[in-house]
Image (tube, coloured by chain):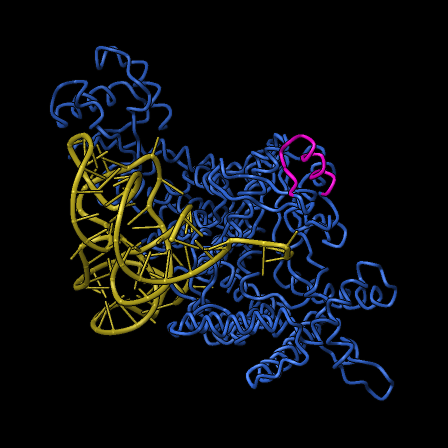
Amino acid sequence: MEQHIRQAILAAAPELFGAPISESLIQFQITRKDVEGDLTLVVFPFVKLLRCSPQEAGEKLKTWIEANVPGVSHCIVINGFLNIVLTDAYWLAQLSQIQMSPNYGLAPQNSKPTVMVEYASPNTNKPLHLGHLRNIFLGASVAEILHAVGHKVVRTQVINDRGIHICKSMLAWEKFSPVNARGERETPANTGLKGDKLVGKYYVEFDKALQKEAKEIMAQWQSGNFSDTPEAIHHAVLNFEQAKQGKDEKACAAIDDKIKELAKNQTQILQEAKQMLVKWEARDPQVYLLWTTMNGWVYAGFDQTYAQMGVSFDKLYYESDTFLLGKDQVMEGLKNGVFYQKTDGSVWIDLTAEGLDEKLVLRSDGTAVYMTQDIGTAIDRFKDFPDLHGMVYTVGNEQDYHFKVLFLILQKLGYAWADNCFHLSYGMVDLPSGKMKSREGTVVDADDLMAEVIEKAKAMTQERGHLDGLNEVERDTLYAQIGLGGLKYYLLKVDPKKRMLFNPEESIDLTGNTGPFLQYAHARISTLLDKANYQPAPIAERVVLRPEEKEIVKQLAQFEVTLQEAAKGYSPALLANYTYELVKLYNTFYQSVKIVIEPDLEVRHLRLALSAAVKQVLAQSLSLLGVEAPSRM
RNA sequence: GGUCCCGUAGCUCAGUUGGAUAGAGCAACUGCCUUCUAAGCAGUAGGUCUUUGGUUCGAAUCCAAACGGGAUCACCA
């Protein structure tokens, strides 16, 4: 409609304004709720052109539009705004159209190029936590949204399955795991622990041992005993100690941290972990066996967690396969002058012209760094998927700089697709107590959180007691749908870019702007339609729309635009807010009129059709958010 | 210190090419179930949009500075 009026005005511009006008002058917006109208044309831009008051300009446009645009009932001019009221027939036609298209709002499948979406990408040394939940729900939802607007989507993750951090849990398990009567160390099978939890436990064990040993070393240093300490470290420690003179508390604490860092480096246990990494890189059979075994436990654990979350992947990349990638590209880039080499052999890129720094892309010993690997992996992915057009990396905003550099490098290496790479950067999740810190044990475990949320949903659902006729399995399914739906919605309704606060109580709320609120509306409509035995049929043209009804149709008509904006902005939050608005409008309607028991059959049918359309769009939106839509609750 | 992000009601958040009297939810208070699911609806109260300047018909939105918070500046990932 908007487009329609825009074109009509453009075409009639000479008649209206005496000259053709630029399209940008025609600005539409949705009419505010508190005034009459469906569509608003901003009059101010025309005021100069017509050399008259906003009121006069508005009147002129009003007369013209009322006479020339079909579908317009009448217009109202206030405060420099021209509010256009469309006819009921127009809105009824919109509703009919939604009713007749089961894929309303969605673009044809594969009508847009292939996009790869990366999310999750965990380390295999500890379980998933709350931060991963935001990452994964966000990535999974964005993948759904991109799919809905027509892209072919490849879901992927890079599993960080190698490196010193992985060796730490491996070593700790070897050193500290108790041995049972059958001579076995702890395994998921003989402890009943989830694999990722077991491995995570030993990662913590490692850290404990490390801290303890470092503390002992620092105590030695404190007492002036440096007999086991290399000369260079000895000096460094003394220098640091000296630097503390006359500094405030904060500066002293920072210096103490550095000393602690030195002490950690001197520990036996860290040396052993490093040795293990060297052995791993040399493919030592024993270390490799241990590595595959323990990673296998972790994968089994992750699979369980992903299943509970309701997410999946189409293609996995393992860092152990990719960590050597990229060196060739770097050497190639070195030849082309994209990179330069320092005398020690290390390779760098100079991005000072772009306002960034110089960045290392290859170590002096020729080994790869994170950046090297990411360059290689990106290029590899485009080889793996020849029709790939772009990539979305769902990674926290602490890596903003890294991705800025990465995309710039890919561009400089001459890959045109670098422009289609997007860092879906999201803010951290804070707790009411502040930041999550693994050392302080304030990390919220993903499995625990999901279980807790489901448990809470169970208790609250039982309190409400709409469970008659559901068997045990159906009830459990419902509890999970509500609990997880609430959690997902809670994490997705906030703009991804923004840092957010996770309030455990609010995350399981059922009232207000929450997942269960939306699910409840869906369930209520479902049973309503069942009760009415609703069948889609043409809507009588003579019915008059109540304001509450028209508001709903207007919101429904916005679905496609909203979905496209959500895709464009990689923001499920836009969709979440849209859906919440839709449900609020529906609830108002629901409470103010009769539906099933409406005696006028044509009106009854309209209201049922409206309800069905809301259910359809609501179910669609929820599904794009990864939230399930129960048909009763 | 350099670079980047953020600052809207007591709390959590919307407010997307600059548009009308800045909106929700939670918390507080008032009403509404003999009627289609009250996990709901209607209402009251709550604001110097951090501050100060600038741009213009018009600024929460754009620009600049200040203040406050965060991230990042490794031959870590």
Display colour for chain A: blue
Q: Does the magenta stretch include residue A390?
A: no
Q: Does the magenta stretch include residue A333?
A: yes
Q: Is residue A496 visible?
A: yes
Question: A173 or A612, which lies in front?
Answer: A173
Residue A479, picture quadrant:
bottom right
Q: Is residue A542 left or right of residue A416?
A: left
| Quadrant position of the N terminus of chain A in the picture | top left
Display colour for chain B: yellow
Q: Where is residue A145 in the image (x, y as percent from the top left)?
A: 54, 44
Question: A507 or A373, which lies in front?
Answer: A373
Q: Position of residue A132 (x, y in %)?
A: 57, 61
Question: A143 or A125, which lies in front?
Answer: A125
Q: In this view, does A362 lie to the left or right of A142?
A: right
Instruction: Find the magenta span and give its range.
Output: A327-342
Indicate whether A27 appears above or below A563: above
Residue drawn at x 42%, y 73% is A433
Residue drawn at x 34%, y 52% is A589
Q: Position of residue A331 (x, y in %)?
A: 72, 38
Residue drawn at x 46%, y 76% is A463
Residue farthest along the bottom direction in this orientation: A181
Q: In this view, does A21 lie to the left or right of A505?
A: left
Question: B52 or A26, which lies in front?
Answer: B52
Q: Position of residue A239 (x, y in %)?
A: 52, 70
Residue drawn at x 17%, y 21% is A48
Q: Can residue A531 be seen in this view?
A: no
